[in-house]
Image (cartoon, rainbow, N blue to C red):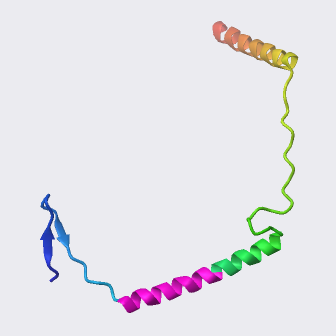
Amino acid sequence: MSPRKADAAGNIIIAMPKPDLSLLEAALVGYRQRRAEIAAKIAELEQRLGSDASGSLSEAPARRKKRRISAAGRRRIAEAQRKRWAAVRKKGAKK
């Protein structure tokens, strides 16, 4: 059985055995290989998309100019909404 210790609060702390360094080195080699495969796939996708090194597309769509509504247009919309609400209230009062 592994040695047990208790902290100041009385919680039991189980000492973990030291990890095998060869196992950690093998894991590191595997992860580096996987990272290289992923980097190659990313480079292939970027090349297919025609993007530059920064990751942004070379032909980004142009931003559309923001539409602004005139004061008269806002007044017409507000008046129409007031009419709709008046109709709803009138219909609710008849019930």
Depth check, front residue: 85 or 6: 6
- By secondary structure, the bulk of the magenta-drawn segment is best described as helix
Q: Residue 49: horizontal and vertical position, in percent? A: 81, 69
Q: Which residues are magenta?
A: 21-37
| In this rendering, position of residue 94 left or right of residue 76 | left
Q: Is 24 colored magenta in this rendering?
A: yes
Instruction: State the quadrant of the N terminus.
Output: bottom left
Quarter where residue 14 is shown: bottom left
Q: Residue 71: horizontal and vertical position, in percent? A: 84, 17
Residue at horizontal 85%, vertical 33%?
A: 67
- Up-down relation of residue 43 to residue 71 (above or below): below
| In this rendering, position of residue 54 left or right of residue 58 | left
Residue at horizontal 16%, vertical 63%?
A: 11
Identity of the residue furthest to the bottom in this view: 22
| In this rendering, position of residue 39 left or right of residue 21 | right
Q: Residue 4: horizontal and vertical position, in percent? A: 14, 74
Residue at horizontal 58%, vertical 83%?
A: 34
Depth check, front residue: 80 or 74: 74
- Up-down relation of residue 84 to residue 15 (above or below): above
Q: Is 80 colored magenta in this rendering?
A: no
Q: How many marks?
A: 0
Residue at horizontal 83%, vertical 36%?
A: 66
Instruction: State the quadrant of the C terminus.
Output: top right
Quarter where residue 89 is shown: top right
